[in-house]
Amino acid sequence: MLRVAMFSAQPYDRRFFTEAAAGREIALQFHEVTLTPDSAVLAHGADGVCAFVNDRLDAEVLEALAVQGVRFIALRCAGFNNVGLAAAERLGLAVARVPAYSPEAVAEHALALLLTLNRRIHRAFNRVREGNFMLEGLLGMTLAGKTVGLIGTGRIGLATARIFRGFGCRLLGEDRYPSEAFTTLGGEYVSRERLLAESDVISLHCPLTDDTRYLIDEAALSRLKPGAILINTSRGGLVDTRAAIAALKTRRLGGLAIDVYEQETSLFFRDHSSDIIDDDIFQRLTTFPNVLITGHQGFFTAEALTEIAEVTLDNIEALGRGEPCPNRVSQEG
Ligand code: NAI
């Protein structure tokens, strides 16, 4: 029996993982707390740890896990920017992730954000409930014929491109590895400068790396087509939030919809409704009528959760038994 300590476990993790673990030789211990140097002790006696996007897996935590006998880390997410891979390799800890699960789930959420923001559905919902049927302030733009720029045309970027194509949008893309699937859809690869200057909507779908951190900074925002809408469902660190606030204030940035936030670790996946939120940048964002924020829910569909649980448990079985695992991540990528 493989013993696995799961951190940041929410009720839905319990439900989908318990269902997927039926009939497998895996014993899961669910811990609600986030993995930190203090909570790492909860992994005592476990063969492996199952972690999520905001669990800390830097050298300090990995060392604390390794001394307790933990042998592997199974991430139940795609991104692994929170893992100190050099330290994991040094400590002999194998790391695996779930590279792809329903890319459509995230793509559809990106569209849900855009449609809500563009047609002011978030404001209309409240108005109608208050008996206010005025339209002033709810003006949107017709998406058909507009230009959409996708930074990253991998699985999710491509799924997003397919939907936008259905809307009748012109597609521009930027990717280090251009894909034929994108051009076959009618997409055109252009330089980042052109993408920023020509797009009415920009959606980010690349991973967070040293190269992509603050990809959308003050300089990039100054190149935007005035009034352009920015969507980020990838990782918060892709956008310099202070610069985005400044661009919203000058009206250059016409709207911002984010499912991820650079300082989300201390906020997301918890109920802070009775707390005073100390993050002034986040609080400023919530004051704009043209900013829409969701708390990292792009992946949150029943189909995606089922797939995440199945693939994570497959990874746990392979890593736990020392068998080859196709979803291992290493420093080389
Ligand atoms: P993927 O690996 O299929 O595609 C990423 C694409 O980005 C690749 O084509 C890659 O060549 C490209 N890329 C890498 N560096 C680049 C750069 N410097 N400039 C332009 N393009 C670059 O990944 P996938 O599955 O499409 O996921 C994308 C991101 O979405 C993930 O890294 C993750 O951060 C995020 N994500 C968010 C979720 C949410 O719930 N909001 C859920 C799942 C993933």
Image: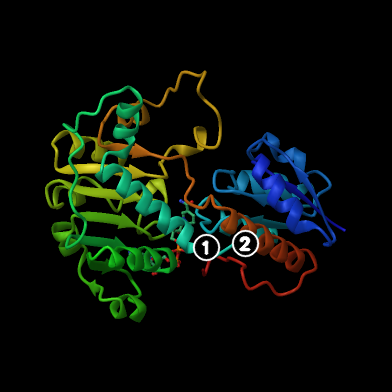
24 or 249, which is in the foreground?
24
Q: Position of residue 286 (x, y in %)?
A: 33, 29
Mark yes or no: residue 123 visible.
Answer: yes
Identify the residue shown where x is 29% and y is 68%.
165
Q: Which residue does the numbered mark 1 point to in the structure image?
A: 102
Q: Check contact, mark 1 vs mark 2: CB within 8 A.
A: yes
| Quarter, ligand 1 | bottom left
Q: Is residue 62 left or right of residue 238?
A: right
Q: Residues within 10 Å of mark 2 (few under 14, many from 20)?
A: many
Q: Tag 2, which secondary structure? A: helix
Q: Is residue 37 left or right of residue 183?
A: right
Q: Is residue 105 left or right of residue 145?
A: right
Residue 257: assigned label: none
- Amino acid at dot 1: Ser
Identify the residue shown where x is 13% and y is 36%.
250
Q: Position of residue 222 (x, y in %)?
A: 14, 48
Identify the residue shown where x is 58% and y is 47%.
58
Mark yes or no: residue 208 visible.
Answer: no
Quarter of the image where one finds residue 149: bottom left
Task: Measure the alpha-carbon separation of dots 1 and 2.
Answer: 8 Å
* Quadrant in which the N terminus appears: bottom right
Q: Which residue does the numbered mark 2 point to in the structure image?
A: 307
